[in-house]
Image: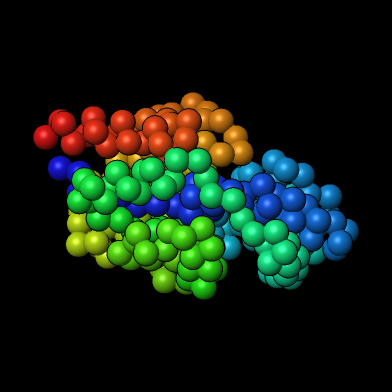
Amino acid sequence: MLKGVLFDMDGLMVDTEKLYTRFWIQAAGEYGFDMKPEHTFYIRSLAAEFAASYLQGIFGEDFDYFKVRDRRRRIMYDYIEQNGIEKKKGLDELLEFIRVKGLKCAVCTASNLRRTERFLKSIDVCDNFEAFVCAEMIAHGKPMPDIYLAGAKALGLDPGECLALEDSQNGITSAHAAGCITVMVPDMTPPGEYEKSKVYAVCSDLSRVIDVIDELTKQF
């Protein structure tokens, strides 16, 4: 029986993936690396331990992942301080529906807790969630299942009782491996055959997830 919903954050609730792409490319360029959008797409939600080796495999061992990431964080932080961030379509509607249904809610994100709280407070949704599971709280990040296992546990639920909402391949791999009912809400890229094989449904925006929850709750 469906009892909880686990939310990714970047690209799902906040429209930040386009900013990550822009500022990863800018930061890497400042260090002399010709990063392309497709490189940033691959590392969406990917834990640092995997992203660092992936990017070094492309740009060589001279690519200092953590130095470039720190620069990306600084320039992205400055941009957001001046311009804010956008809320993804349908989020408020979905959260209200979940509240009325009496389902539990948690955030399972590759971002750290400080950034997660800052972003979600800025779009006025932070209080909708009972738990936050962030990058620094688990041994292995996405695409490993740890974060979704921890998210379900934080709500006192089994993973199979939870709907996981994701926009990226790495997040979908993580949620599916944890045993969650996984739904993709695409952001920067459309679902491929891999993603389609791992999810219960693909929704064009968060408001469409309401129909999925209705369908799932009627099955029991």
**Quarter the N terminus occupies:** top left
Q: Is residue 79 above or below residue 172?
A: below
Residue at image location 66% in from the left, 47% down from the top = 18
Residue 162 appears left or right of 173: left
Q: Is residue 110 visible?
A: no
Residue farthest to the left, as pictured: 220
Residue at image location 77% in from the left, 44% down from the top = 36
Residue 140 appears left or right of 42: left
Residue farthest to the top, as pictured: 193
Q: Is residue 220 above or below residue 19?
A: above
Q: How many marks?
A: 0
Residue 132: x, y in percent? 38, 65
Q: Which color scheme does this rendered protein use? A: rainbow
Residue 82: x, y in percent? 72, 64
* Nearer-the-camera pick, 188 or 198: 188
Q: Is residue 50 above or below residue 184?
A: below
Residue at image location 85% in from the left, 56% down from the top = 29
Residue 195: x, y in percent? 46, 33
Q: Is residue 181 visible?
A: yes
* Nearer-the-camera pick, 54 or 200: 200
Residue 59 appears left or right of 220: right
Residue 104 appears left or right of 184: left
**Quarter the C terminus occupies:** top left
Residue 42: x, y in percent? 62, 45
Residue at image location 68% in from the left, 52% down from the top = 19
Quadrant housing residue 105: bottom left
Q: Is residue 189 above or below residue 94?
A: above
* Nearer-the-camera pick, 112 or 80: 80
* Nearer-the-camera pick, 209 or 200: 209
